[in-house]
Image (cartoon, grey):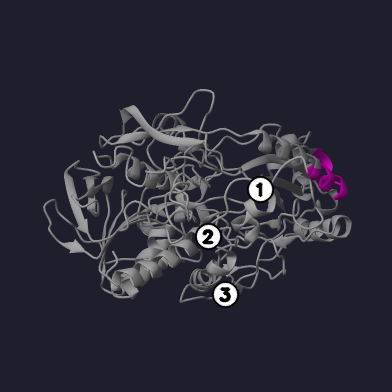
Amino acid sequence: MCRGFLRAVMPGNQTVYDALIVGSGASGGWVAKELTEQGMFVLMLEAGPPRLPTRDFTEHVRPYQVKFRGFGNRQALLERQPIQRLCYACDEFSHQFFVDDHENPYTFPLDKPFMWVRGRQVGGKTFCWARESYRYSDYEFKAASRDGYGEDWPLSYKDLEPYYDKVESLIGVSGSREALEQMPDGKFLPPMNLSCGGQLAREVIGNKFGWVVMPDRVANLTVVHGGRPACHYCDECQRGCYTASYFNSPSVTLPAAARTGRLTLVSDAVVSHVLMNAQGKAEGVYYVERTTHAHGEARAKIVVLAASALESTRILLNSRSSRFPGGIGNSSGQLGHYVMDHFTLEGAGGFLPQFKASKREPRGTPCGFLIPKYVNTGKYVNKNFLRGYRFDGDGSQELYEHAFGLAGFGSEWRSRVRTEIPYYFGMMVQGECLPRYDNYVTLDAEKKDAWGIPVLHIVASHGENEHAMAKAMRNDVMEILDAMKIEDPQPPSERLSVFGKNIHECGTARMGNDPKKSVVSSFCQLHDVKNVFVTDGAVFVTQGCYEPTLTIMAISARAGDYIVDQYRKGNL
């Protein structure tokens, strides 16, 4: 964990930094590292507090050691975190990594629910992310050229490839090389092992469908890397990691930036808007101290928003003036539009009777298996919808949970509980959400957060393409379960996941070459204000069906190089 570089910046401080970064997560950490290592003095503002492993990490805490035995204080969660508690990773052990919903409200139409999961702390959501790290390919970057829908990214895989290399080399990504055009290989550490169920799936699915079944590519270390020890397989990554064996920015990128002596990080600074001068350039940000509610201004020659996709756009929208009545970066009218989030079908699975045993499989691996996207790549074409989806799954044995369903009593019953541990095989499918103008965010006209800042009103729903894709997803899953000879097979859910539930929200400040159709350039620079950059998922043009975080980090590293180059040339 990074320590020793938290410095207070009091209201009235007149220091003008080379650059100011809002947000300390996956994106902000990479921009800070690139800028400071190349000589720039950087101020980073983070809305939340720092996290201390001895206080906040709970990966080795057992249920009997906590007050509510792992089930959590349901009343408190309902009162303070009614949205956050719906996230799979938010529970009695990890709720501290998620925001207080009453302090951080937002609104949405009753018929279009949106589940906005947020983590405000030094490190952002990198403490509790799922760590899946896949490169995008030109199937994503040039999707519009393939199928005619929407816009291409203003960059290609080749443009981003060296930055993928750089990111993977530092953070450590375990994975296998598969030579797939639609999911490029990278700089991998040895892969995690597949479970017994995963190995069976690789054999059966490979033989029947010809699809690759591979271990997830995850930012968990399988060997010592960069001074960090390998994963010890406790399988509680969402609770923090004492050994820093998975990537989070306070363990990797922020310490690298801090070692330069050119990073000043201020926690508990809730940024409201960007400050503009009479010439139409940014000169800093206005913020509110989280605990005291004192107001302050921070000054810099360059402003980088890396606060997460929707938060960065919220700051831009709130940076209104007579010169920028719709917020800065909004001359195109595109700001806030094209919000995306993956959708999933969950709950599919059943039992593999051949693996029922008296001994549990020695597991703890923080990942399962992946079947990469095949539909609408190569010969696998489905004309009922655009783009595609991928599969995730794994097999496991829970400790004695099956006892609730076993009839009997006494020693015979106890013997059956111990010797008949069932083996469950589960799957989910994740599909791409098309970017649509009518999926958007704007500022709520009335509601404000605990610091008096206007909140977002989010309007987003799944369209016809997602529903058509879901039909094919269900059919494929059931064919897989049938091929696997699953006992008591359960189909996936009929309903698509709630928008936002996957925590992969992207878009709303998309990049492009045409200022009339986009908000930022291929280097994440606002078309309208040249010394303001947005480097997080807000800039995504399309999303594909893979997790966005690795691409966010690669884009951030690339933007960092560009900022340094342009700053040295006097263009900012």
In the rendered image, the residue lying farthest to the top is 110
- Quadrant where the C terminus lies? bottom left
Q: Is residue 41 left or right of residue 131?
A: left
The residue depicted at 35 percent of the width and 57 percent of the height is: 52
- Residue located beneath label 2 in the image: 551
Magenta residue check for 75: no
Element at label 3: loop
Q: CA distance from mark 2 to mark 1?
A: 23 Å
The residue depicted at 35 percent of the width and 34 percent of the height is: 455
Does the image show residue 247?
no
The residue depicted at 68 percent of the width and 69 percent of the height is: 176
Using a 10 Å C-alpha cutoff, classify the residue at mark 3 as few (fewer than 14 neighbours), some (14 to 19) or many (20 or more): some
The residue depicted at 33 percent of the width and 69 percent of the height is: 566
The dot on residue 248 is: none
Q: Amino acid at mark 1?
A: Gly
- Residue located beneath label 1 in the image: 148
> In the rendered structure, which segment of residues is drawn in magenta?
476-489
- Quadrant where the N terminus lies? bottom left
Labels 2, 3: front one: 2
Verify CB contact (< 8 Å) between mark 1 and mark 3.
Answer: no
- Residue located beneath label 3 in the image: 223
Element at label 2: helix
Q: Is residue 131 left or right of residue 148?
A: left
